[in-house]
Image (cartoon, rainbow, N blue to C red):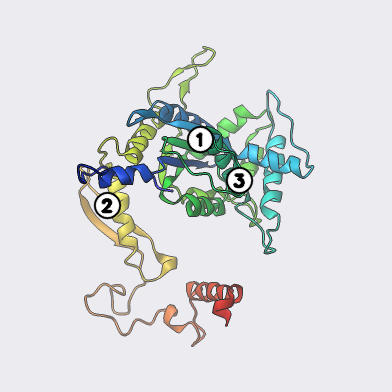
Amino acid sequence: MSAQPLSFPISGTPHSPGSREIVNNQASNEFVFAVVGHAGSGTSEIAKTLKRLLSATMVGARRFDVVELKAKTAIERWARDRGWIVPQASAKRTLIDVRAYQDLGDEMRKEKRRDGKEDHAAVASALVEPIQESRAERTGVQYRRGEAVKPDGVPRAYILDSLRHPAEVELLRHIYGEAFILIGVVCEEEKRIDRIGVKYKDGGREDALIFMKRDADDDKKYGQHVADAFHLADFFIDNTVDRTKKDGTPNGTPNKDWRPNDDLGRLIKIITHEELVRPVMAETAMYHAFSAQMQSACLSRQVGAAVVDGRGNVVATGTNEVPKSGGGVYGEGAEPDHEDARCGFFANRDFRFCRNTREHSAIIDELVNEIPELRN
């Protein structure tokens, strides 16, 4: 599924459509946004803000048609189909209710697929069907489960609130390609604890910390692993500052220091190509840091850093690399180092091994066993 194409002038003959027009007619103009953030970070607030901004955004002569879908709804639907009890909605929710949804999500990801393996992307998979159903309804096509529904070129966005497992991210990226954008919601831990205490009547500090630990990195592989999914985000929003100030009024007053509104607006300009948007200083610095990390030949040590001055000029970059006997690190010279004796080259000798090499071998063995053409 292609996103909005870049604008570039290409002409055709006077009696035929130009190449640009042909390409534009094939574009789906659809985007799938997903939000991920630790408990208490405010992912729903970001999803609502994104929906409001997109609904007011023009792409050509059309506004975005925006559909918001919640993972919670997909879990409820799955649970009811199997006769599970779903917590009843109440004015003041409790952490007990939320833990019940965590349990249902775990059961959903633990359920075996046809190949007998757990489906850790089950929640995301359950959100794909509502996307198809929604597209069919909006394009006037009868929806048949398992059949593709072709986009009609109308600017449309689906917002998924929210993802809790890296396998969900991998599935959605595989399905929607470059039309998929994952937004990571950043929020300081103490602020998240405070928000949980306000939102849930049993949200004391100790209970909040236990709840947050399970949400971020559960002991079970099929549990929630938001920390891993969070680091896969394409764009990050800092939601530490509250959207409104508490001043005694029923809804408070708008907080001018709340940045997500501006940051999401910038993201929309980037993905729609409606305006030239340059990278900010932090993005440029992260680009150099990412580039620096790739100098390391050891995957388990690929960490880069960049130091920039107040104007964004790069002062220095650094790479986490293995020290070399005699000084320096491996791989820094122009000539190949034939004495590079790191563990990766001794995976089966001298009692030395590389965890990455072992992991690669395990992946290859699994592929060979699963694919008959390779096994033969």
Identify the residue at image location x=34%, y=81%: 340
Which of the pair 356/55 is nearer the observer? 55
**Element type at marker 3?**
helix
What residue sits right under mark 3 in the picture? Answer: 215
Q: Amino acid at mark 3?
A: Asp
Q: Residue at x 29, y 49 (%)?
A: 285
The three-letter amino acid code for the residue at tag 2 is Val
Q: Is residue 165 left or right of residue 11?
A: right
**Disc 1 to disc 2, C-alpha distance:** 50 Å
Q: Is residue 53 depicted above or below 144 in this figure?
A: above
Q: Secondary structure at mark 2?
A: strand
In the drawing, does residue 41 fall left or right of residue 303? right
Dot 1 or dot 2, earlier in sequence: 1
The one of 371 and 268 positioned closer to us in this rendering: 371
* Amino acid beneath label 1: Thr
Mark in front: 1 vs 2: 1
Which residue is under mark 1? 139
Q: Is residue 255 left or right of residue 202?
A: left
The quarter of the picture where residue 326 lies is bottom left
Q: Residue furthest top?
A: 249
- In the rendered image, the residue lying farthest to the bottom is 350
Q: How many marks?
A: 3
Q: State the residue position of label 2.
A: 307
